[in-house]
Image (cartoon, rainbow, N blue to C red):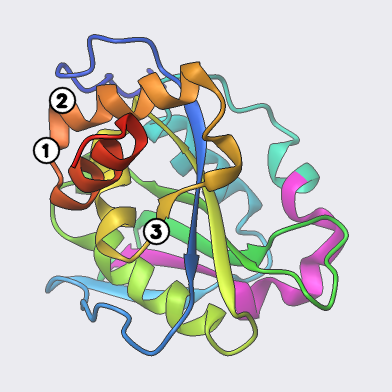
Amino acid sequence: MSRAAKDPRVTYENQSFGMVCDVGADIPHHVLPAGYRLRPFRPGDDSVWTMLQRAAEPFFDIPDDLFEREYGKHRGDLPDRMWYVETEAGAAAASISAWWEHEPPTPTDRGRIHWVVVHPEHQGRGISKAMMTHAMERLVCSHAGAVLGTSAGRPWAVKLYLDFGFRPDPRQLDKPDVQQGWRNVQTVIHHPVLADWLQGLDGTP
């Protein structure tokens, strides 16, 4: 299977960074488009997850054991914290998990939006928005805050997270390469929240 194409508007270097938010009651509400349904993880979904990631990931290879490394120690929690979107015919289209901040998890952990993926054939239909609503509603049951990792090469994913209340991780503000990554994203998404944040970063009114 060939790797998904990079967004043609991303002409800059891909830079990883984190995002954080408080988890509250004002979660944006989105529903799946017609023709799709959401279901929890079930045994045997390891290969489905790997297939989706390989189809959609433009920047790095997905090794065979990645699912086991990311989730294998907590398989009993997967039906409560991982979901798949599929078509009415049962074809896998997307996946998301509402995980923990750390491994092993601690009682004070924030939640983590983890490994959000939509197969290229199903992108651009609002599936990610609906998955985020569901995952954030799960996180609010157990966590006061949330974190996630993403990168400048995924500007429309970044826009989605900004729309759900995530902001650049303040612990990374002293890293020039991360700051530049955020500036690069803004050249694509032109997000008002990010514009205000960058003005504050630059010390401009």
Q: Which residue is mark 2?
A: 187
Q: Nearer the viewer, residue 176 or 35?
A: 176
Residue 199: which disc? none
Question: What's under tag 1, amino acid-wise?
Answer: His
Which quadrant is home to the C terminus?
Answer: top left
Q: Position of residue 31 (x, y in %)?
A: 21, 78
Q: Position of residue 156 (x, y in %)?
A: 23, 41
Q: Residue at x 66, y 69 (%)?
A: 110
Relative placement, left or right, of 16 versus 43 is: left
Relative placement, left or right, of 97 versus 34 is: right
Q: Which residue is mark 3?
A: 166
Magenta stretch containing residue 96, yes or no?
A: no
* Quadrant of res 58: top left
Give the distance between the C-alpha atoms of the residues marked 1 and 2, in whole angstroms. 6 Å
* Quadrant of res 102: bottom right
Q: Position of residue 169 (x, y in %)?
A: 52, 46
Give the distance between the C-alpha atoms of the residues marked 3 and 2, in whole angstroms. 19 Å
Residue 190: which disc? 1
Closer to the chain start, of discs 3 and 1, is 3
Closer to the chain start, of discs 3 and 2, is 3
Q: Are marks 1 and 2 in contact (CB under 8 Å)?
A: yes
Question: What's under tag 2, amino acid-wise?
Answer: Thr
Describe the element under mark 3 as helix, strand or loop: loop
Q: Which residues are magenta?
A: 70-87
